Image (spheres, rainbow, N blue to C red):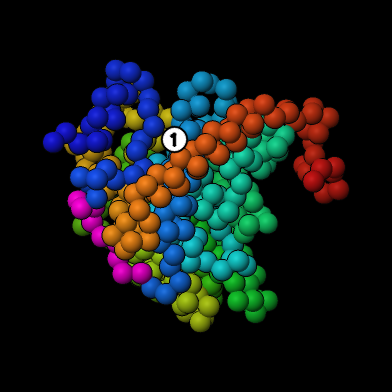
Amino acid sequence: MVSSAILVFGKLRSEGPRMLEVLATDHDLERQPPLAAASKGFNLLEAFKSLVNLRLSEEVLASRYREQEMRTPTHFGTGQEAVAVGVCQALGPDDVVYSHHRSHNHYLARGGDFYRLAAELYGREDGCARGRGGSVHLTARHKGFIISSAILGQTVATATGSALAFAMDGASRVAVAFFGDATLEEGGFYESINFGAIRRLPVIYVCENNLYSTESPLSVRQAADSSLCDRVRSFGLTAEQVDGNDVAAVYNAASRAQQLCLAGQGPVFLECMTYRWREHVGPLFDHEAGRDYRSLDEVTAWMERCPVRRAGAQAVREELATPAELRTVRDSALARIRADVERARQAPWPQPATLFDNVWPGSAGR
């Protein structure tokens, strides 16, 4: 049987892009591996809805990005959705999240508004950063999503600073930093986790290990047989590796991490094993663009482990929803997302007179 992933690549080569399917077909349902037994508080159906929202948001944006009206470098997180959804569902309303350049999933999973994300990519005034930040500088402070940054490892330090503030204030709050595996090659990462460990700060360091830094695999960046978790444990942190394509397993690990942090036993490091389907930056698939730093077989194998289809299949098994009801979730989400993108495309541009708003204290702006 020809895999669905190969068919997707075939379409991309010959006929242009098409929407990736987010639901398992009837014959594919039984082939989807089960999720981990979820701990108390996990809501599989809500997690599935969030996964669908993230996946379809990225799919629609990637499709529209090809029109070249979004003039911002954009790093799509297709394939990595379960990490963001599992962690964010485990957090409390007062906890805060920081992200990196591949930030759309975290922004949306934490409750960020998709319309404002789309408007930001179009550079419009209604964008979450008023059209000034682009894809890599998102914010939804009212939802606890503080900021994303393109500087590798920067938000590891800022999340540690937030955790220090929570500890000094005696607040029952946790800070979370999302980042990729290449961040463990930055000196600031080790300064941050060392400080966090010394002060036992309530911070969760979430590494989305997708095996590549741009086009460089782990094998050319780190010593053979090295372990990210072991490296972090040497600083005195609790560290755990988890299947980053299993939203329930991620939720369980994040819940344990949050409990440890609130009990004064932080920080905690989570290494979530996942995979980036698209190119490092931009809307294309690597094989569509003629890149060969990773094989089509490797990409296909990871696409077959789709976290969205896997969660949907589990919801059907547990009789939380029928396949028809899951299709309704997909179709309604897709219609809303497409409408929001078109509305964002028509939104007003920032006024030139507002260029210096918020540049210094007391300057105008919201």
Which x, y percent locates residue 154? 54, 51
Q: Is residue 303 left or right of residue 195?
A: left
Examine the residues drawn in magenta and state their main secondary structure. Answer: loop
Q: Which residues are magenta?
A: 30-38
- What residue do we see at 72% from left, 34% from top? 125
Nearest to the observer: residue 355 or residue 92: 92
Name the residue beneath numbered marker 1. 59
Question: Is 306 in front, or is 167?
Answer: 306
Question: Does residue 32 belong to the magenta stretch?
Answer: yes
State whether residue 203 is above or below residue 321: below
The residue that appears at 37% across and 27% down in the rendered structure is 18
Is residue 333 visible to us here? yes
Determine the residue positioned at 49% across, 38% down: 334
User: Against 94, is 57 above or below?
Assistant: above
How many marks the image carries: the answer is 1
Q: Is residue 337 magenta?
A: no
Image position, residue 169 (x, y; %): 68, 76
Other-residue count near label 1 (Cα within 10 Å), few / some / many at <14 / 14–19 / ≥20: many
Q: In terms of image quadrants, where is residue 158?
A: bottom right
68 up-or-down from 187: above or below: above
What amino acid type should be assigned to the residue bearing mark 1? Answer: Glu
**At 59% across and 72% down in the image, what residue appears?**
173
Q: Nearer the viewer, residue 21 or 108?
A: 21
Q: Is residue 243 left or right of residue 191?
A: left
Tag 1 secondary structure = helix
If the image is split into quadrants, where does the N terminus sit? top left
